[in-house]
Amino acid sequence: MSLQRFLQDWAIPALIGLAVAAALLLLFPHLRGQTEKVPAVGSFQGPVSYASAVNLAGPAVVNIFTRKVVSQRRHPLYNHPLYRRLLDNMNLPQQERMQSNLGSGVIVNADGYILTNYHVVSGAEEIAVVLADGREAQAKLVGSDADFDLAVLRVELDSLTAIEVGDPDKAQVGDVVLAIGNPFGVGQTVTQGIISATGRDLASTGNGSYLQNFLQTDAAVNPGNSGGALVDAYGKLLGINTSILNQSGSTGGISFAIPANIALKIMQDIIEFGRVVPGWLGIEAQTLSPQLARSFNLASTNGVIITATYNQGPAALAGLKPGDVITHINGDPINDGKHGVAAMATLRPGEVVNITYIRDREVRTTQATVSEKPQPQARD
């Protein structure tokens, strides 16, 4: 057999076959008989279970049951619109009945203090607290504040588990959160979602209060969850669940929580003073609009501009003047007027704060001693 015939019949086809096989092995590695490595369970990013967070926070969340006496007219025709006015004019005796309500609360320290919502215990004559371990006790109402929708209860029990408090100021949109409470009275229930927004103002929804820094979440919150805990993925308290934005009364994917740092400040005020004592700097301010920012040659709209100061008020004594733009309080940015109100809500009279402000395009700092807002003088 000649060399040329050998190359044509055997060598060249063999070389072509080897080249094709090598290409196939490069393109399809599994043909080599090797299996791709599957990541170990421990190497996954993010938790596959939030059980540890629930085990940490769950024992500190309680169920609250209240009872109050309500008066009503029991005449069978009273609900008929044609007879209601006639029966009202007859001055029929009113009968009393007991009305029950339910909600949730959070044990915040081992001394038995519990945070819940004002609307959960408002007007209640009896307040019963049921712990996660099944123990039950009558609770004493220490105090409450309708504007902040917060109330402080206390129970006399041993071996209480207090919740660990997180930092709601560091909460970011997209963070995983858990809502723990007693929806519809079915017992302690955990729902999961994310932080949908921070610094939310509810004034335009009709649910607003003095506080304008709500955490918004899509974790399912239903009637009975009010006063319960909103915790992060590590079981640390971020807020007190307080309201839902849904006319049907059930969750619609939008619910709100009072930040934990503000709720704890309100609790301390109620325990120490018997009422809420908001911090006061003695200024009037407004949000920095783009037009105002341009007129003051500022690079951004972050901050609030002082429009007036009160004589001998903390701000005036610290050297602040109308036209100054406050950008930070104690190092925390004041992004807009709403954040400014929320920042002041966490301050207490006598506390010294560091204020960063801009004057004549120059960044300056000063210190002010927070005071309580003077009460208006009664006229003779």
Image (cartoon, helix red, strand yellow):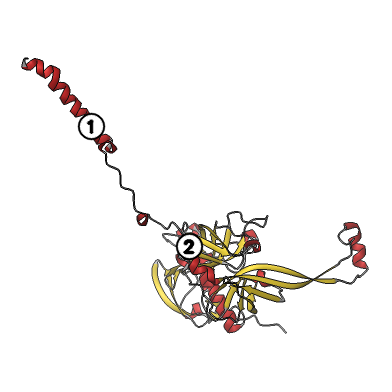
Residue 133 seen anywhere in this rendered image of the structure: yes
**Residue 102 at x, y percent in the picture:** 67, 67
**Residue 204 at x, y percent in the picture:** 62, 59
Is residue 369 found left or right of 103 in the rendered image? left
Q: Secondary structure at mark 2?
A: helix
Q: Secondary structure at mark 1?
A: helix
**Residue 318 at x, y percent in the picture:** 46, 79
In the image, what residue type sits under mark 2? Ala
Q: Residue at x 67, y 72 (%)?
A: 121
| Callout count | 2
- Identify the mark at residue 285; answer none if there is no mark: none
Q: Which residue is mark 1?
A: 23
Is residue 257 found left or right of 26 in the rendered image? right
Q: CA distance from mark 1 to mark 2?
A: 49 Å
Is residue 27 found left or right of 279 in the rendered image? left
- Identify the mark at residue 51; answer none if there is no mark: 2
Q: Is residue 116 above or below residue 244?
A: below
| Mark closer to the chain start, 1 or 2 | 1
Q: Is residue 248 above or below residue 267?
A: above
Q: Is residue 312 above or below residue 258?
A: below
**Res 190 quadrant in image:** bottom right
In the image, 204 versus 80, the foreground residue is: 80
